[in-house]
C-alpha cells in the first residue's frame, strides 16, 4: 500500500509490531499450558537482553528491505504460529523468529536483498544458525510464501486499525480485536480466505 512508503508510517508500524510481539511473548511466558512446550531451533538458552523494540529497530535500520516486507513478515509469523501450535511465540524465540521472517519476506518480495550472512550479523547470530532457522521456518510454514493482494490488503487494514487504537490512550487495548489474554498466537481477527472473499465483494459493490 502507498501509505507504507511514507517516512512517518514505518517507524509507527515498527513500534506497533514490537509492542504486539512483546505482548504476545509476555502472555505466552505466563501461560501455564506452555510451560512444557516443544523446544525448537528458534529457542535461545536464555532470554536475549536486547528488547524486541530495539531488535526490530536494528533490523529496520540495516536490512534495507522494502516496507511491504514487514507486513509480509507479519503474515508469515501468523502462518507459522497457526501451523505450529506447539511453538508459541515467547521471550526465548521471538527474536530469532523476527529476523528469520523478515529475511524470508525480503527474499520473496524484493528483487535485491542481502544474503544470509548479512542477516546473521544484523541478528547477532552465526551464518550457520541463520541457515538452519531459514530452513526450519520454511518447513514450519509449509513453504506457503505467496501472499495474495487481498490478503496483504486485509493485514494492512488490520494493522492500521490496531495502530490507530494504540495511539488513542483513552481506549482500553483489551477491547482490541487482538486480545493476548485469550490468544496463544498472533491470531488475527480474520481468516485469510474469508478476508479475500470479503474484499472481492467490496470491490464488486464499488463497481
Image (cartoon, rainbow, N blue to C red):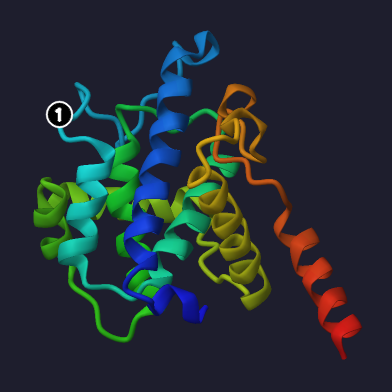
Q: Viewer-proximal residue, 2 or 76?
A: 2
The residue shown at (17%, 54%) is 58
Task: Choose top left, top right, bottom left or bottom right for residue 117.
Answer: bottom left
Q: Residue furthest front?
A: 170
Left or right of 193, for residue 207: right
Left or right of 61, for residue 92: right
The residue shown at (27%, 52%) is 99
Q: Quadrant of the C terminus?
A: bottom right
Q: Residue furthest right?
A: 205
Q: Residue furthest bottom?
A: 207
Q: Viewer-proximal residue, 161 or 194?
A: 161
Residue 79 visible in the picture: no
Left or right of 116, for residue 190: right
Residue 37 rendering spot, x and y as whole percentages: 45, 19
Task: Choose top left, top right, bottom left or bottom right for residue 12.
Answer: bottom left
The residue shown at (73%, 53%) is 191
For disc 1, the neighbor class at 10 Å (few under 14, some 14 to 19, many from 20) is few
Residue 34 visible in the picture: yes
In this picture, is 124 found above or below 37?
Answer: below
Q: Viewer-proximal residue, 39 or 22?
A: 22
Q: Which residue is mark 1?
A: 49
Q: Viewer-proximal residue, 117 or 47?
A: 47
Residue 146 rendering spot, x and y as whole percentages: 55, 71
Left or right of 166, for residue 127: left
Assign a secondary structure to mark 1. loop
In this picture, is 89 found above or below 158?
Answer: above
The residue shown at (59%, 22%) is 181
Amino acid at each position: 500500500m502507498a501509505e507504507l512508503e511514507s517516512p512517518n508510517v514505518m517507524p509507527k508500524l515498527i513500534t506497533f509490531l514490537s509492542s504486539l510481539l512483546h505482548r504476545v511473548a509476555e502472555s505466552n511466558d505466563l501461560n501455564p499450558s506452555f510451560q512444557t512446550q516443544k523446544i525448537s531451533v528458534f529457542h535461545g538458552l536464555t532470554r536475549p537482553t536486547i528488547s524486541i523494540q530495539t531488535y526490530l529497530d536494528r533490523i529496520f535500520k540495516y536490512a534495507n528491505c522494502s516496507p511491504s516486507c514487514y507486513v509480509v513478515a507479519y503474515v508469515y509469523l501468523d502462518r507459522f504460529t497457526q501451523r505450529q501450535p506447539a511453538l508459541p511465540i515467547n521471550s526465548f524465540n521471538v527474536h530469532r523468529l523476527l529476523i528469520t521472517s523478515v529475511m524470508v519476506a525480503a527474499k520473496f518480495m524484493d528483487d535485491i536483498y542481502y544474503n544470509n550472512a548479512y542477516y546473521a550479523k544484523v541478528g547477532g547470530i552465526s551464518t550457520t544458525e541463520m541457515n538452519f532457522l531459514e530452513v526450519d521456518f520454511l518447513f514450519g510454514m509449509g513453504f506457503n510464501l505467496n501472499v495474495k493482494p487481498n490478503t496483504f490488503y486485509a493485514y494492512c487494514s488490520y494493522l492500521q486499525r490496531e495502530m490507530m487504537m494504540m495511539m488513542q490512550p483513552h481506549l482500553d487495548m483489551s477491547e482490541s480485536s487482538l486480545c493476548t489474554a485469550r490468544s496463544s498466537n498472533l491470531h488475527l481477527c480474520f481468516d485469510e480466505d474469508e478476508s479475500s472473499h470479503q474484499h472481492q465483494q467490496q470491490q464488486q459493490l464499488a463497481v
